[in-house]
Amino acid sequence: MDHEFDSASSLEEETRFRPFTRDSKARGKTVVQDDDEDDKPYSRLKQGLRLPFPFRNSLPSALVNTLLEDIDPFYNNKRTFVAINKNKYIFRFSATNALWVLSPFNPLRRVAIYMLIHPLFTGFINATIIVNGFFMVLHSNPSIQSMKAICTAIYTLEIIVKVVARGFILQPFTYLRDAWNWLDFVVTILAYVAINVDLGHVAALETLRMLHLLPIAAIIPGLKVSTQSVIESLKRLKDVIILTIFLLFVFATIGLQLYKGLFTRKCVKNFPMDGSWGNLTTENWA
């Protein structure tokens, strides 16, 4: 415990909020990595977390919503930078070119970063997810379909903003390096497929639309933590799950061999309660 406190105190003294400039980017390329096996990111300065209390008071208001040199010493040689919004949440980005052409200093990328970290943008997207979930339980009609199309367009705008701000997939902290963004991306693609392809009455395909409700888990902190805990538990239980599926398959095969042909897929209209079911005629069957 004392070690953690000393580490936090030393990190607070070491951390300085400095604007991210072209010179900062050049220094990031020349820093030599120290091969230290114990060197790990500071747990309280991770992407998406709120700035720890000791650091909040030392952040100048002029540097809020601007590009900063990474405040975690672990990333000194990782070619990253951060931005901190007015609610003091940390957003970490790759300092490489997004989509191969947009440097961190490109005006278009800087606008996208500003939009991404702004609390109003996050609140707007969260409200869209909730409203879209409400429309999904209503009876489908042209007006509801139009509202769903608007929600899909908003999801698409969110993807574009995130991809322009972060990059797509190749570098750390890019769009598809976040599992939640994979979910958003797949759900949006499925929404466009549902618009252009007639799904008919296939229930299995219709239920794919319910995936739109899953991102709500990402906007409720407690639910997000619980969901991540369940996912981590399932990863550790993968061997048990495989064994369970195998046993279910074996017993299902045995049941199929024992009972196939005995049930003729018909129901009895009036099942006798006196035990004379063996004397039923064809008139008693549906």
Image (cartoon, rainbow, N blue to C red):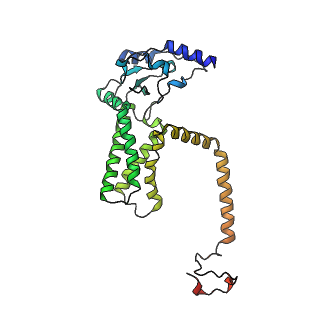
Which quadrant of the figure has residue 237?
A: top right
Instruction: Out of 213 and 190, give the one closest to the viewer.
Output: 213
Q: Name the residue: 35% across, 29% down.
A: 113
Q: Is residue 239 visible?
A: yes
Q: Name the residue: 46% across, 56% down.
A: 207
Q: Name the residue: 55% across, 17% down.
A: 8
x, y percent for residue 116: 37, 32
Number of callouts: 0
Q: Is residue 140 left or right of residue 231?
A: left
Instruction: Out of 99 and 10, give the one closest to the viewer.
Output: 10
x, y percent for residue 134: 40, 51
Instruction: Out of 282 and 60, give the one closest to the viewer.
Output: 60
Instruction: Out of 35 and 198, give the one closest to the viewer.
Output: 198
Position of the C terminus, as image quadrant, is bottom right
Position of the N terminus, as image quadrant, is top right
x, y percent for residue 115: 34, 32
Q: Is residue 184 above or below residue 86?
A: below
Q: Is residue 99 visible?
A: no
x, y percent for residue 177: 47, 35
Q: Is residue 222 left or right of residue 125?
A: right
